[in-house]
Image: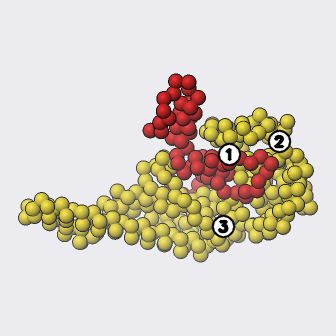
Amino acid sequence: MDNTVTSSKDVALVEILDRVLDKGVVISGDIVISVAGVDLIYLGLRTLLSSMETMERLRDSPIAGPMQEPT
Amino acid sequence: MDLIYLYCVTNRVPQPKDDGCGVYSLNHQGLYAVLSKVSEDEFGEENLKKNLRNLEWLKIKAYRHEKVIEEVMKDGCVVPFKLATLFITEDSLKAMLKEHAEELRGNLENLEEKDEWGVKIYCDVERLKKISLIDDKEILRMDKEISSSALGPGKAFLLKKKREKLLNDLIDKKIEETVQEFLTGLKQQSLRTRFNRSLPRDVTERMDDMILNAAFLVEQDKLSAFIREIEILKNQYYEGTGFLFDCTGPWPPYNFC
């Protein structure tokens, strides 16, 4: 990664998500979502997303055994 | 049914680009809400929850949110809202503007002609250790002792542990000093600072560690002094020193509303 000042065009997704999901004014609109999405950033987007999908699949599956935390 | 998506509020008439996504504005006593109509299919509560967990969807919406606000920012000060701030009717949006008018005006006044700049510092701890070892006499002395065959295994083990601790303390001190030096320099060239959580490696997807995650509010006409300070620090702390930093901006003032 370069040490120079970078313009917002080249900025990583993480920079944008960090701001639009976690910063900015919070005023409840009419749709109140529990932004558990915010935690996505701090827990590792890809890891969490895939483990959440796995958990949902396990939950819905009729042959699912006892719920296990995906590794 | 359409919902109303709020991007930001500004105090000058916004000139939204006609990008085919239907950005428009609503005026309430000089406060302009920048909006677009979105479908309930995408942004209704249930579907929104699902969509927020879809990285591809999130990526598109986040970029769009940011781009719209940046466009408005070209013409004047903005108060950026969080992603997915939605209203069912324009009336409820107006009611919100009315309720928070004073707060919004205050924010806009305080942020006039100022921009947010983000600074992150990363540290390659292994490299820093290697560099520090060259200088530190105490550790070098310990290394000599450890590698000499005069010590029994028990003593060698203990000495190794002591050495590890000494090295780690040295690194911690170096990191602390570097961060402080950065902050002192940058704080002088900015109005406000906000510290955020450092992001872990699986988010940054880097091999080094984030040791500072800060946002600075900088007056636009003092920007060159701020950038100059960044350049000075950059020249002192380049990659070879074990530190690396990243400065981005100008951002809408997400961290200062």
Residue position marked by numbered label 1 in the rendering: B62
First in sequence: mark 1 or mark 2?
2
At 36% from the left and 61% from the top, the residue drawn is B128
Say if A55 sits above or below B115 in the image: above
Crowd tier of the residue under label 1, counting other residues whose Cα lies within 10 Å: few below 14, some 14–19, many 20 or above: many
- Which chain is mark 3 on? B
At 63% from the left and 37% from the top, the residue drawn is B54
* Residue B141, numbered circle: none
Say which chain is red. A
* Residue B217, numbered circle: 3
In this rendered view, identify the residue nearer to me: A37 or B60.
Answer: A37
Amino acid carrying label 2: it is Leu
Which image quadrant is residue B192 in?
Answer: bottom right
Secondary structure of the residue carrying tag 2 is: strand
Residue position marked by numbered label 2 in the rendering: B3
Say which chain is yellow. B
On the question of residue B60 being in view, the answer is no
Crowd tier of the residue under label 2, counting other residues whose Cα lies within 10 Å: few below 14, some 14–19, many 20 or above: many
